Amino acid sequence: MIPAMPAFHLAEVNIALPIEPLDSDRLVDFMAQLDPVNALADDSPGFVWRLQDDTGNNTGIQGFGDDRLIINMSVWESLDALRAFAYSNRAHLDVLRRRREWFERLPVYMVLWWVPAGHLPTVGEAEARLSRLERLGPTPEAFTFRTHFPPPGAADAGAVRDDRELCPAG
């Protein structure tokens, strides 16, 4: 018997505001890790899709009202698949641990939401979800790793609070 395809996948977006231009000496290490970490994501269990431009990364994609922002958006089969990549992958963790060297602090920089399987979210959708999270806090339509919700139609539709340390050295 062939397993049923899930009805929903998890979309995520995170934005970052570099402290200097991407071609500056201060961001050399970050830029050197961008393609290898993207390739690791592409090959990770549960990975579905990521936003990218013609170069294969995301640094040329604009949105959120600021041309300097880097937009990282992807779709995953599940919250567990995204969590495994984001917080168990050593190369990705190394980048997360150093993010304050390269990026400004933003009050809200990441949001998760469920999309129908096969749907690829747009930057406009991501902007709306991040704005919703900023205005209302975590809801079934826009949430975080720490306070997340199951896919629509799940038996238990309540919020799940996860207080584990999700990003060391943050």
Image: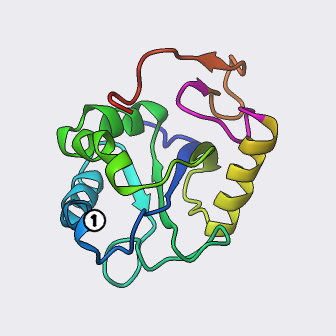
Q: Which SS class for mark 1?
A: helix
- Residue 20 visible here: yes
Query: Mainly helix, strand or loop, the magenta region?
Result: loop
Q: Position of residue 139 (x, y in %)?
A: 75, 33
User: Which residue is at the front of the view, 166 or 103?
Assistant: 103
Question: Residue 141 location, x and y as percent?
Answer: 73, 41
The correct choice, above or below, for 159 with respect to 8 in the image is: above
Taking the image as shown, residue 163 lies to the left or right of residue 155, namely left
22 inside magenta stretch: no
Q: Position of residue 165 (x, y in %)?
A: 41, 20
Which image quarter: residue 134?
Answer: top right
Q: Is residue 123 left or right of residue 12?
A: right
Res. 36 image quadrant: bottom left
**Of the pair 78 and 126, the residue shown nearer to us:** 126
Q: Is residue 1 in view from this perspective?
A: no
On screen, residue 44 versus residue 137, left or right, reads left
Does the segment drawn in magenta span residue 140? yes
Disc 1 residue type (three-letter): Leu
Say few, some or many: other residues with alpha carbon within 10 Å of mark 1 (under 14 / 14 to 19 / 20 or more).
some
Tell me, what colour scheme is on the image?
rainbow
Start-end of magenta stretch: 137-147
Give the residue displayed 51% in from the left and 52% down from the top: 14
Q: Residue at point 70% right, 51% down? A: 129
Above-or-below relation of 157 to 46:
above
User: Quick check: 50 above or below 23?
Assistant: above
Please tell me in which quadrant of the rendered image residue 21 appears.
bottom left
Task: Give the residue displayed 68% in from the left and 19% down from the top.
Answer: 155
Query: In which quadrant of the rendered image does the C terminus lie?
Result: top left
Which residue is under mark 1?
A: 27
Kindly identify the residue that appears in the image at 28 percent across and 57 percent down.
42
